[in-house]
Amino acid sequence: MSDDQQQQSRAAFAKGIEHMQKGEVEEAVPCFAISGVLDEDFTEAWKALAHCWEKVNNLEKFEGFCLEECKESFDIIDIWTYLGLFYVETKSYYKSLTCFQRAAQLDPSNPTCQCNYGQALYELGLEEEALVVFKKARVLDSKDANTYNGIGNTLNQLGRYEEALEANEMAISFTPDDTAPYSNKGISLSGLGR
């Protein structure tokens, strides 16, 4: 990210804060959205946007606020994805589920959206539903290590170790330097008594 992008992000954030102080949630939403998209790692922007969403408490209305002012600046799917990731980091899995589910609805052919949605379902203990979504992601991109890792992890949780082992080995073949699939493979092998 360039210094200019960071300055634009902070300026948009400051403008959003001004609107919030005046009780102008509708005007604050696009400011925080732009701030977050310009600097994905700016947690305060995502926290502020999450706060706005909770105040609005209406998915379509919230999207409308985002798109009304800045539809040329970003894709609404990015907003739902980043907001979902923010909620995962804060362990607010039900809220992340809503965000990822919306992103997946808006772009059902996007394997990353599907994988994020599957992960949120998994985190909430909805393994069977997660498995369905992860398998959909695999159909969309048969070479995505995160999808195979999600499938392997979920199958381990369901006690389907042989299938999990296969998925974990696929994840390892795509990202041999990632330790997560090796850990999942160990769980599969242990479950199989090997």
Image (cartoon, rainbow, N blue to C red):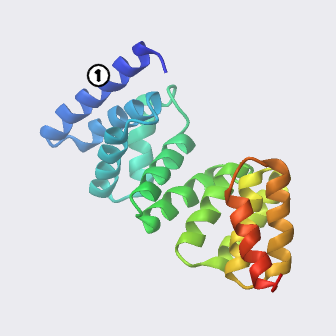
Return the residue nearer the eye: 124 or 175. 175
| Residue 151 appears anywhere in the view | yes
Q: What residue does disc 1 label? A: 11
Horizontal relation, residue 185 to residue 104: left or right:
right
Q: Amino acid at mark 1?
A: Ala
Residue under the point 34% across and 51% down = 50
Horizontal relation, residue 189 to residue 29: left or right:
right
Return the residue nearer the eye: 79 or 64. 79
Return the residue nearer the eye: 131 or 149. 149
Residue lying at the far left in this picture: please name it: 22
| Residue 132 appears anywhere in the view | no
As helix, strand or loop, the secondary structure at mark 1 comes to: helix
Tell me where residue 108 appears, x and y as whole percent.
70, 54
Residue under the point 77% across and 60% down = 148
Answer with the quarter of the image where residue 185 lies. Answer: bottom right
Tell me where residue 1 appears, x and y as whole percent.
49, 21
